[in-house]
Structures are given as C-alpha cells and as structure tokens.
Image (spheres, coloured by chain):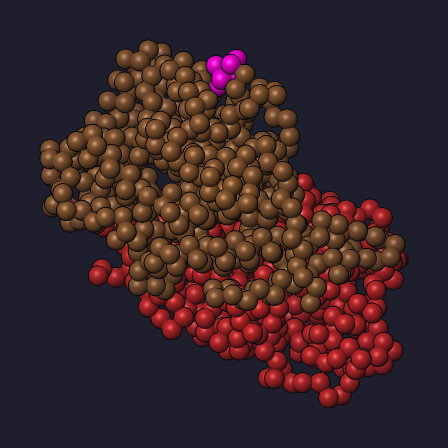
Chain colours: A brown, B red
Amino acid sequence: MGARQLHLNLFLLDTGHHEASWRLPSSDPYANLSLEAHQHLARVAEEAKLDSVFLADSPALFGEPGRRPSGRLEPTVLLSALAVSTQHIGLIATASTSYNEPFNLARRLASVDHLSGGRAGWNIVTTAGDAAARNFGLEGQPLHKTRYERASEFLDVATKLWDSWADDAIVADKDAGVHAVGDRIRPISHVGPHFSVEGPLNLPRPPQGHPLLVQAGSSDDGKEFAARWAEAIFTAQPTLAESQAFYVDIKRRVAAAGRNPDHVLVLPGIVPILGDTEAEARELEAELDRLIAPEYAVSQLAQLLRVPPGRLSLDAELPDDLPVEDEIEGAKSRYTLIVDWARRDRLTVRELIGKLGGGRGHRTVAGTPVQVADTIQHYFENGAADGFNIMPAVLPSGLEAFASSVVPILQERGLFRTDYTGTTLRDHYGLPRAARRPPAIA
Amino acid sequence: MGARQLHLNLFLLDTGHHEASWRLPSSDPYANLSLEAHQHLARVAEEAKLDSVFLADSPALFGEPGRRPSGRLEPTVLLSALAVSTQHIGLIATASTSYNEPFNLARRLASVDHLSGGRAGWNIVTTAGDAAARNFGLEGQPLHKTRYERASEFLDVATKLWDSWADDAIVADKDAGVHAVGDRIRPISHVGPHFSVEGPLNLPRPPQGHPLLVQAGSSDDGKEFAARWAEAIFTAQPTLAESQAFYVDIKRRVAAAGRNPDHVLVLPGIVPILGDTEAEARELEAELDRLIAPEYAVSQLAQLLRVPPGRLSLDAELPDDLPVEDEIEGAKSRYTLIVDWARRDRLTVRELIGKLGGGRGHRTVAGTPVQVADTIQHYFENGAADGFNIMPAVLPSGLEAFASSVVPILQERGLFRTDYTGTTLRDHYGLPRAARRPPAIA
C-alpha cells in the first residue's frame, strides 16, 4: 500500500444519476424517501471499501417536480441514520452557507461526526438560484461574490466553534466533581460583516477536529474558496484535458494559499454505465436516453441558460447570443461548461439534452468493467484526478455492478484499498486530523 | 383497551436527571455523546412499550460546563440515528422557533418523520436566555412576547410547508413519465412580520401529516400558544394540586380555542427514584444529593433568579426583593414555580438546591415500584395528568428499574398498553393524522 491510492466516493441519488433512471422497470420510484434504499447503497459501498458516500442538496424544490423523484431528505439527518447502518464509510452532507446559521450547522455536522466516530464530511455550497432565496425571506439570490464572502466568514466561524473546546477539555473527574476544565472551553466572540457569534459550541471538539471539508464550485470565486478551505473537491469535467487543466489549476492555487497540495484531493465525477460487453452498456445508455422527456429537458436547459424555452429548438444548435459567464449569478462554472461543450461539439439541443440527462456535464463512460477501470486509471496516472466521485446512471444496480466488477480490477492493479486501514473519513482520504486554532484568551 | 390509557414519554438525558448522577460509580460520564448509550435507552423504553422518547435542547452551552456533562448532540440528528435503532417508539426533538429558519426546521422534522415511518415529534421552544441569542447575532434575547409572536408565525409557516404537497401528489407513473402531479404541489407564498417563505417544501407530506406538536412553556403566553398548537404538553408541577389546576386551565383554554381537549395531552414530569423498599430509594436520593456541588448550584440558581450569587446564602431563605414574573424575559413559568415553592415551604437555599438538583421543579417520587405506580395512577385518575414525562434520576439504571417494575404494575392495572397497537407517534398518543389545509390557488 505504499503506492499512491485512488479515493472513491459514491454520490447517492435515489434511482441513479440518469434523469430517466426512475422509469426503468426495476427502479423503485420511492427510493428518494426510503431509509432502506439508502442503507442498501451505503452498505454496498462500504463492502466495496469506498471512502465515502455523499448527498447533494438545495433548500428548495428544484425544477418541475412532476418529472422525476424530487423530494429530498435533509442530508445531515439522513446521514446520521446511515451512520448507524454502517461502520467505516465516510458520510458527506451538502449544506448551504447562504441559508444556514453557522452555530446550527457547525453543531449538526459535529453531532454527525461524534455519532459516527469521526466519519462526517461537509460539502460546502453557496446555493445558486432564486427558488432557495425565496424560502429564506429574500427576493432573489444574493450576488455570487457576496455568497462567497459569506461562505468564507461562515467557515471562519464554524472552524472557530469546532475549536472552542480543547481536545483535553473533558476530564470526567467524579471524585472532584469536575467534568470539564472550564478554561479549556472558550467563547469565540466572533464579530464580522455577516455574523456575530459568541460561542462556545455546546459540543466537545469533533473526533476529526473538523469534519472533512469538501467543495464543488468551479468558478473563479469557487476555486479560490477551495484553495483556502477545501480538503476534497468534487468537479464536473467532461474530458481528460479539462480535468488535467482543472487539476493543475487547483493544486497551484492551493500551494499559493500556503497549503499542501497533497492535502486537497481532486475527485471528478464519472458516470459509469456498465455491461458485459461495450454494446450491452451502450444499449442501456440508449434505453435511458430514450426515456428522457424532451419538453421537460428543454425547459430545464432554458432555465440554466437564462433564455425563454421558446428560444431553444430541439434539432438546432444553441442560439449565438447567450449571456457570458460574467453576467451569470448562479452556477457560473456549470453554465460555461455546458455552453462550451455544445459549441465545441456542435451539438443540437436534442443531443445536448441526451448528454446532460445522463451525466449533467460529468464524464459518462459506457463500457465493460475493464474499460471503466482503464479510464479511472488513466485519469489517475495522468495528472487529472486523485480519485473519483462515482455517479452510477442507475441505482442500486449500477453501484452493485461497479462494486463487484470495477473495484476488484482496481484492487488487483494495486490502485485501491482491499480493506479500511483507519477509522475516520480523514484516515480514508489520507488526511491528518484538523489542527486546532484555540480562541484568544479574552 | 377500551378504558382511558396512560401515555408515557421518556425524557432522555445522558446519566439521568439528577445533576450529580454522572458522579455515581456506575455512570458513564461520556454518555451524552454516545450513540450506544442513547440506543440502549431507546430500546429499553421501546421494550416497555413507552409512547416516545424526548430530547431537550438549547443552541448554547448552558451554565458552567465544568460541573456536569454539558455537550449536547443536536436532537434531529440524534433522533434520526435512533429511528434506525428502534421500530415503534416515537421520537420527539426539541427545536427553537427563535433560532431556526422555518424552511430548514420543517424540512428536518419532515425528514425524521419520513425516515422513521411517522414517529417524529417536535417540542416547540422559544429559547430563553441571552447565551443562545448571542450565538445568532443578537445582543440578548428578544422579549418574551416577541418570541411567542415569532413562534406562532413559525408554526403557521411550518404547517403550510408540510401541507404544500397533497397526500396524493406522487403518482409514479413510469409509462407516462409523470412522477408527481404538478398542480398538487403548491407554493405557500407566506409573507408575514417575521418570515417570507415561498415554498413549496422539497419533501412530500410527512407520514403523520405533521409531526406531533409538543410544547412545554407554562407562562400565560406559553399556555395560549399551547392551546392553539400543542398536541402534547410537558410541564413541571411539583404537587398534585398544581397539576390539577394546570390541567383544568389548559383543557379550558384548548376548548376556548375551538379544539378538542382530548387531543391535547397533559404530561407532567415525574422523577422516579426506585428501591425495593422506600428506605432504599431514599438512601439513593440522599446519596445523589450529597454529590451536588453547592457552590455550582448556587451560581446556577442565582442566574435563574437574576441576582448576583453573593445575594444567596446557603442556610438562609431566598431574599425578599426578587423580581416578579412580569419583569422576567425568559423561562417565566419556571421562575415563578421555584420562587413560590421556596417561599411556601420556607426552604433554605441549600434545601431548594437539593430539590432542584433532583428534579428541577418536577415531582420527585422516591419509593417502591408500587408507590411510584400509585402516584401515577392517582394523578391520572384525579384530573391531573393524561400521562407522564418520565425523568429517571439516574440513567440507564432508573429507566431499567421503571421498565421492569413500574410498567408491569401499570399494565396489570389496565392503565397502560401491553403492546403497540399502531405504527405512528400519533397512533400511540391516540391522536388523528393531521388534517391538511391546502395552499390557496394563486
């Protein structure tokens, strides 16, 4: 195990990442609300020794609810349940810095870390979109830049709260009647433009020091934020070249921020569609694409591109006069990725919808287990990835196939663990326990 | 089972409700952070067929952290874990209307209700104290009246969000590609003095319609709020006469609010200290009282009474010139209860501390299982209670003793179920599924 090892995360999403996956005969259309369905996925992932499972999230109903399962259990609550159902695997919850209070969220994440014995991670998002803003007293989303400023201060407050108890604060001296040493628990007395938080947290320091910090925004603001705070990065990169460019850019920014680039893992998304033969895999992919409802997909795409749905024509390319990224206030990097991709490959709207419905801009690989393993290895060994965010097109079958056919190949090649060697999520990712910055003495 | 039945809730609190319980040789001083300790309590309570378990909460570190276990796992997260570890018992989380956003909290509670198959309850609190306020950008707590106004609007928003999906919104029609019927999911478009929330919730209607609504404030504002919203009420009443007066008052207010008094259960707290003989129980009580650290308890009491600790003298009665309830902006009813009790029984500060350290103003009964069962039956049959909030002085031993010795007596007397007859928390409490108020069509 001396050689550099892959890190693999399972992106949990009810019946799978292809938007039409719920329509397959074998799919459970209530999987999004099912504890048992999530338990099964987490256990299969743990059996395969994956580093972690992950839940995306937004505090709003996204898109048109009629067309796919749209209810979403809140991630910290769901992952706490999965902590009971698993022993080793990491548990990464998405939560918004724009629509939470730092005290409440820092506490929930610390609670999951305590309950799970140090397996909690936080995918930090600033939450694009007006729909979420309108659930929290705003007319529309704050500016992209403002959201990232708030996110930075939020992280400052959250890490101070996690550090408000010394690791040795609790002594549990029954004879003396002293449970904790008072001056090892300190207020943080944070006062800033977005937050005033006195502290301390009402929980001892989490087992990992801080939950693992994960990030996924790939705009310039997003990458700068990642360089300062992230320890793992999920990213959508449809080609090897784009992944390599992103990888180099992030590692450079991390070094420039004075951090160790090896302590920030880059995990592009990959949508595996597996078959015993490549033809079988491609047939499954085609079956899924046939199940996409085009009128719904056009309306989703139009929303993302900020144009009226009538501007898009199924068998034509994208209009020439779309906004440029600077004018976009949410999901900037996703916007640019899609527009560039469509123009480069001269895709019609119908073709673009097929590609987005499958992987939403992530790399889709339809093929045999060896082909999928080869792709993973190629990225890993060519400066494009430290591992992958696995997004099976169909769940649970796509995970079961990946676990039973791709993982053993990666293990045989010495690229992936055959058993867990540590107990915390940071252990799995090869990262140290978070160092403590104690609050100043008042 | 035709006769009126008792309802019993277990108030979960690490090593027990006596503040010195953690110092007993048998106590686990890390129980407050332990999943296993909470799982054990929930399973013993379920084995005894109790209606529910309950977690208190405040988003602040309370009191002096040195003197007893003070870290608190966030209740929705912890109860979600306990949902996996149990099959039947209800799960009641305390959460603050003053320091949460309605969208986030309504969603987390709905998530626990979905995950647990309809076993979630919400103990609604407005959160007294400046410490919590200072963790959320305020200088000090909002006025008592303002907190209750916000609480009422919060409940209005939360119930609208839970009702934003019709019960038949999801059709899961794979052939037609229709997962949910769009016009059965509606925005709530709430605009009020404290909140503007567009909705809909990003979760289908919870299994219970709404999680069970529980409340514990006993001030005038608190009782009016309970009459409008609560379905179960936890209350601290140290004597039978006070319990009876409270019971009559609440049922009258509920009727005046146009609701069915039978659908609002009054559950006073009781602190059982059990022994094979009364002498044995009293010896355990005395042992616990000897372990209270008086200097700490005086400082806690002084904080509650809004006087400097130097004003209290251990072997004297309370000073005459304490504030009256109207001047108190937090925990009003608890304040009055303590002051009245001390004056009526002419307790010294030391005696008062002993009583508060045991039950914090709740009724303590040290005795044999028959004596404890007799007390419960007497309250239940004399207009003082619909059941009890069981607060064992020591955990888990006090719960184990209650489950194995008191519950069977109550069952033999036909007062308490011998098995669960329904699946949801509302079923256990004999309450109907919440009716839906659909949002108006825009």
Residue interval drawn in magenta: A407-413
Q: Give residue B342's quadrant in the image.
A: bottom right
Relative height, residue A50 to residue B144 (above, below): above
Relative height, residue B81 to residue A141 (above, below): above
Q: Is residue A351 visible?
A: yes
Residue A412 part of the magenta-drawn span: yes
Identify the residue at image location x=44%, y=47%.
A224
Q: Is residue B105 visible?
A: no
**Quarter of the figure that contains the C terminus of chain B:** bottom left
Identify the residue at image location x=61%, y=33%.
A427
Identify the residue at image location x=79%, y=72%.
B298
**Image location of residue B379, percent across then percent down:** 66, 64
**Nearer to me, B45 or B247:** B45
**Nearer to me, B3 or A165:** A165
**Image location of residue A324, percent across then percent down:** 23, 48
- Predominant secondary structure, magenta span: helix
**Nearer to me, B32 or B318:** B32
**Image location of residue A186, percent across then percent down:** 68, 61
Q: Give residue A316's quadrant in the image.
A: top left
Q: Is residue A353 left or right of residue A8?
A: left
**Image location of residue A67, percent across then percent down:** 25, 39
Q: Is residue B188 left or right of residue B27?
A: left
